[in-house]
């Protein structure tokens, strides 16, 4: 096992059981469902597990979401469309390292911070164009949601080591 793998295993298996993880997926324009207006939506395949704290999100746009005059992306869940991206990511042009902190509310003030996840949660992407989502004809990106897991996560009945 590599040194990094050993460090991750020790974090997961320690008394606190904390490990840094991510939900990630390559997304193309055709993966979105057109809502009939300016937005397209997509639920990612993997959920954020219960007992996690979302740090934020990162987007790498390989091919800009073009065809209209603009396109931005919010990353959140069914009840809060920008829960995992404090502001929207500009996905109109190719770009690396579009990083946003999670949208946290602390003491009535909204800002960047950790977002707690009490139950397994589906990540919902909302891409919004300038005029009509149907005009967006191209686009491909990698979307990553980074979180701290407070539980050892299992794959096929075995702990990820």
Image (cartoon, rainbow, N blue to C red):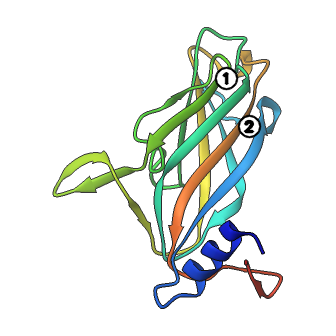
Query: Would you place residue 71 above or below residue 78 in this image?
Result: above
Query: Would you place residue 80 above or below residue 94 in this image?
Result: below
Percent x, y of residue 80: 45, 51
Which one is nearer the viewer's eye here, 76 or 93?
93
Percent x, y of residue 79: 47, 55
Question: Which residue does the image show at 33% across and 53% down from the upper left?
Answer: 104
The answer to which image quadrant residue 121 occupies is bottom right
Q: Residue furthest left?
A: 107
Q: Secondary structure at mark 2?
A: loop
From the viewer's perspective, is 87 left or right of 19?
left
Q: Are marks 2 and 1 in contact (CB under 8 Å)?
A: yes
Quadrant location of the C terminus?
bottom right
For disc 2, the marked residue is 32
Which one is nearer the viewer's eye here, 20 or 45?
20
For disc 1, the marked residue is 133
From the viewer's perspective, is 49 left or right of 100?
right
From the viewer's perspective, is 21 left or right of 147?
right
Instruction: Using a 10 Å C-alpha cutoff, classify the residue at mark 2 as few (fewer than 14 neighbours), some (14 to 19) or many (20 or more).
Output: some
From the viewer's perspective, is 79 left or right of 91?
left
Q: Residue furthest front?
A: 3
Quadrant location of the N terminus?
bottom right
Q: Residue furthest top?
A: 69
The answer to which image quadrant residue 75 occupies is top right
Task: Give the alpha-carbon distance from disc 2 to disc 1, as whole Å.
Answer: 9 Å
Question: Which residue does the image show at 68% across and 19% down from the upper left?
Answer: 94
Percent x, y of residue 97: 58, 33
Percent x, y of residue 140: 77, 29
Q: Secondary structure at mark 1?
A: helix
Q: Earlier in the sequence, mark 2 or mark 1?
A: 2
């Amino acid at each position: 096992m590599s040194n990094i793998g050993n460090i991750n295993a020790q974090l997961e298996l320690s008394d606190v059981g904390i490990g840094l993880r991510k939900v990630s997926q390559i997304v193309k324009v055709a993966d979105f469902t057109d809502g009939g207006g300016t937005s397209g939506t997509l639920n990612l395949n993997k959920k954020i597990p219960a007992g996690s704290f979302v740090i934020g999100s990162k987007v790498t746009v390989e091919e800009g979401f073009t065809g209209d005059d603009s396109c931005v992306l919010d990353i959140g869940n069914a009840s809060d469309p920008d829960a995992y991206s404090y502001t929207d990511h500009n996905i109109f042009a190719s770009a690396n390292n579009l990083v946003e902190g999670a949208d946290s509310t602390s003491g009535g003030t909204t800002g960047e911070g950790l977002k707690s996840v009490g139950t397994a949660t589906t990540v919902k992407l909302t891409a919004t164009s300038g005029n009509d989502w149907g005009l967006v004809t191209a686009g491909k990106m990698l979307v990553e949601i980074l979180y701290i897991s407070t539980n050892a996560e299992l794959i096929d009945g075995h702990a990820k080591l």
